Image (tube, rainbow, N blue to C red):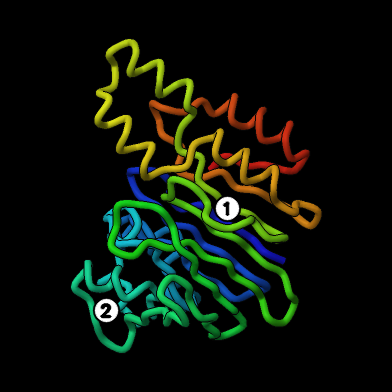
Amino acid sequence: MIDVKVIGTGSSGNCYLVNMNGTKLLLECGLSFKTIQKALNFKLSDVSACLVTHEHGDHSKAVKDLIKNGINVYATKGTFEALNLSGHRAISFKKDKVDTYCYHFFNRFMILPFQAVHDAREPVSFYIKDIHTKESLLFITDTAYIKYKIPSVDVLMVECNYVKSVIDKKVQDGKLHHVLRNRIVKNHLSLETLKEALKQADLSNLKEMYVLHLSDSNSDEKYILEELQKLTGKSIKIA
């Protein structure tokens, strides 16, 4: 069984606790260390490791504190370079080609990072599989589009940052500068782009879908939920 606890999501800070059959993993640590500790009931030792997608503060704020407190952090070489971090607990994912990564195994997890499209040094998303039960989770955030076909998974955690019609109307009404609009579009996943990716995906085994990183001002939670439920027919939770 895969259980997901949303500790924080969005530009104020991202952090998620994934419990795969009793083994716990942090995805992102973009909140204060104290906030994360509190969310874990101060049982940091229960966490096997933390995976970080990229160096931006809303995803990596507590990295140094986690490492100081004995938690292994996994990220790309570029992410650790951008954070100026090294050491035996800062574990870089290896590549087998220029733009593809090797599978990484630890505890009961098999992890495959894959490229994201974002204004960071070496951003990635994650495919995570429990090697004992074969259950799987896909975690996609902070990317303009999804470079690969979404595989069959049990749990999908995916960004839906903005709705194109909402953001374009704000530009038209003079409420959003076109430069900022273009920056958002080049770095985050829209409802429209997500829907196109889901149309190509195998959702037959999908049990839960978590929609992440909604913009407070450029999205429409009710509309997003309705559109995704209509498209997928699955259980969807807005984080």
Q: Quadrant of residue 124?
A: bottom left
Q: Which mark is residue 68?
A: 2
Residue 4: percent from left, percent from top: 59, 57
Q: Amino acid at mark 1?
A: Met
| Above or below 170: residue 158 | below
Residue 62: percent from left, percent from top: 29, 64
Element type at mark 2: helix
- As measured in the structure, the alpha-carbon distance from the residue carrying label 1 to the one carrying label 2 is 28 Å
Quadrant containing the N terminus is: bottom right
Q: Quadrant of residue 28?
A: bottom left
Q: Which mark is residue 2?
A: none
Residue that appears at 51% across and 52% down: 6
Q: Which mark is residue 157?
A: 1
| Above or below 193: residue 218 | above
Residue 228 placement, left or right of 179: right
Which one is in front, 33 or 216? 216
Answer whether labels 1 and 2 touch (C-beta < 8 Å): no
Element type at mark 1: strand
